[in-house]
Image (spheres, grey):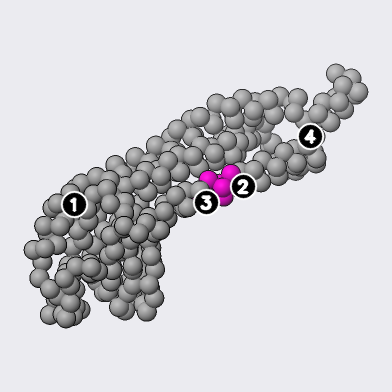
Amino acid sequence: MTDASTSNIKGQWWKRKDVRKTAVLWVVLTPIIGFVATEAQVRPMGDPASEVMSNVIHLMRIFTWAAAPVAALVAAIALTALLGKRHYGDTPPADADHAIKDSPRAVATWLVGSALLCLFALAVGMVAIQKDNEALLDGDAVEINVTGQQWAWNYDYPGSKGVRSNQLHLPVNKPVVFHVTSMDVKHSFWIVQMGIKIDANPGQITETAVTPNKTGTFDIRCAELCGLLHAYMQNKVIVETQYNFDKWLASQPDQSKTTWTDQGETA
């Protein structure tokens, strides 16, 4: 190969053999990483019990597939380097003759691509948050006051005859707004299968909303390390028909003048 042709290839790094090998690996690895990473994250989430959780799963799929080309490119470069030429001996290896970092085209492509991915993630995330918070503006929503304390969750039902419980009951297909606070330390109110989680702060009220779309019994946990028995700070939410919810609410005693002990039971 003449000096002129060698110099031309050095200047056009994308024509090099190892760069072409990296490009092939990139194309092959992108769908593999996208599929495996998506399934590894989504499958353990289980079946959603609300549109919010469905949106969370959908968002995870979108973000994972959007990130797959970046992860695949890094993996392709690593594999090409590991499986390529090796240097032996005491002398340092020769400098690369086609450093991509010196290419304005490569740098510009990386910067523009990264910026577009960030803007895409921001826009999609903001749309999802706005959609999930629509129930907060619903005037017909069920209001629930949630109080966390070491180590129990307690629920009050405004508008009822003073009903209070340590197991949450909700009507299906009805927007619910939670007003969340804490009596002692910071907790985090998390309904796992419904995809909502919000901090419970002492002396403050935070709000979150969801519309359960499936009847059944689902998990509530504390997602903030809150002391010795943090792992046991969990109970259940029963989602039932409106008729059964009203029937349960009517069957409960008036506890508006009772207080909660440290064990989360009425006294």
Label 4 neighbour load within 10 Å: few <14, some 14-19, many 20+: some
Name the magenta segment's main secondary structure.
helix
Q: Residue furthest front?
A: 139
Q: Position of residue 44 (x, y in %)?
A: 33, 43
Label 1 neighbour load within 10 Å: few <14, some 14-19, many 20+: some
Q: Eyeballing the image, is 252 above or below 130?
A: below
The residue labelled by disc 2 is 119
Is residue 6 shown left or right of residue 187? right
Highlighted magenta segment, given as a residue range: 118-125
Q: Residue furthest right?
A: 4
Q: Amino acid at mark 1?
A: Gln
Give the residue at x 10% y 70%. Answer: 253
> Cα distance, mark 2 to mark 4?
31 Å
Circle nearer the viewer, 2 or 3 = 3
Which numbered tag is attached to residue 267?
A: none
Which image quadrant: the N terminus?
top right
Is residue 189 shown left or right of residue 167? right
The residue labelled by disc 3 is 126
